Image: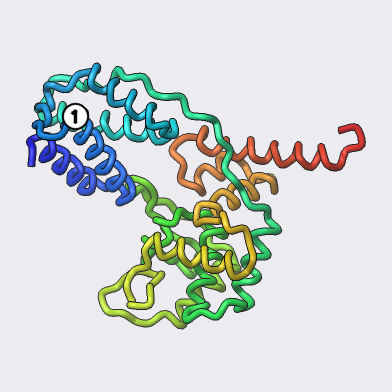
Amino acid sequence: MSELGDQIDRYTQELARTGASPHTVENYARDLRQFLDFVSPPETEPPAAGAIDLLIVREWMARLYAQRLDPISIRRKLAALRSFFRYLVREGVVPQNPARLARTPKAPKRLPDVPSAETVNTLLDGVAAGKVERPQPARDRAIFELLYGCGMRVSELVGLNLEDIDRTEGWLRLRGKGKKERQVPLPRQAADALERYLGERPVVRDEPAVILNFRGKRLTPQGVRGIIRLYTTCLGSDPSLHPHSFRHAYATHLLSAGADLRAIQELLGHARLSTTQKYTQVSLTDLMAVYDKAHPKA
């Protein structure tokens, strides 16, 4: 393997060691491998890290634009490259970060697709009614109730351990991005579903995970996505729903009901209020849609 390839491997190992999510590590590793392929034409050795300059970075970005990649994807790839070179600067491998001065593509302002309260409640009622024959219906219901009732990320759901549940006070301890911990209240329906599942959950030695797969091991994010896809298909619900849809719904429905934006920020574990504020735009969009449909002068 080339020297640059070795440095990429060491960097991704460092990312994992310092607490980056597996999703981030996987994406950054793939993006950096693509950059390595770009600077390594067939039958040539890739350049040393110190030989990579801003011009090479701009040529790589031009290639990405020519491939008609989404600006969001290009922004992530550039972020991966910048982070990689920051690591090399810290390690004393290169004197400066050539990706730092590359212009970041503007991301289109997109509002998240948020299912209505009626859509979510109809789906959850279908799950609770046992309309889909499943080997672990109590577990499946707990998954849906926790995602919507607590607004958690799918990584936080599968990362939940038995010791993170405070049944007496009705709280959950979640580990978010960067392994930052926060507490969220456990609403009644989610608490009931969780209690029912825990009563049936097999006792597995040395397995602290709350949500288990059929092998008695921690369920993966891919497993959760598959479960949601199965239920939405079988119950005739919105097939575009995914685990994060319930987080979007949680925030938007709280805001529509009058919850304080700062409180929602804390519940979601957002580092910046601006990230939470996108839900105000969703609420305004929904409000205008109702106005346009109902007002005689619209």
Query: How does the figure colour the protein chain or chains?
Result: rainbow
Residue 96 x/y as whole percent: 18, 20
Quarter of image, res 99:
top left
Crowd rating for badge 1 (residues with CA inside 10 Å; few <14, some 14–19, many 20+):
some
Amino acid identity at mark 1: Val
Q: Is residue 175 above or below residue 62?
A: below
Residue 247 x/y as whole percent: 54, 52
What is the tally of numbered marks visible in this picture?
A: 1
**In-image side of 232 versus 266 (left or right):** right
Seen at 56% across and 39% down, the residue is 262
Seen at 88% across and 38% down, the residue is 295
Residue 95 x/y as whole percent: 13, 20
Seen at 36% across and 63% down, the residue is 220
Task: Name the outermost residue toward the front.
Answer: 43
Which quadrant: the C terminus?
top right
Q: Using the image as rendered, state which of residue 250 and residue 170 is in the foreground.
A: 250
**In-image side of 241 versus 107 (left or right):** right
Seen at 51% across and 77% down, the residue is 138
Q: Using the image as rendered, state which of residue 171 and residue 95 is in the foreground.
A: 95
Residue 240 x/y as whole percent: 56, 54
Which quadrant: the N terminus?
top left
Q: Using the image as rendered, state which of residue 146 and residue 184 is in the foreground.
A: 146
Quarter of image, res 178:
top left
Q: Secondary structure at mark 1?
A: loop
Q: Is residue 136 above or below residue 96?
A: below
Q: Is residue 69 above or below residue 166?
A: above
- The residue carrying mark 1 is 39
Task: Name the outermost residue toward the right.
Answer: 296
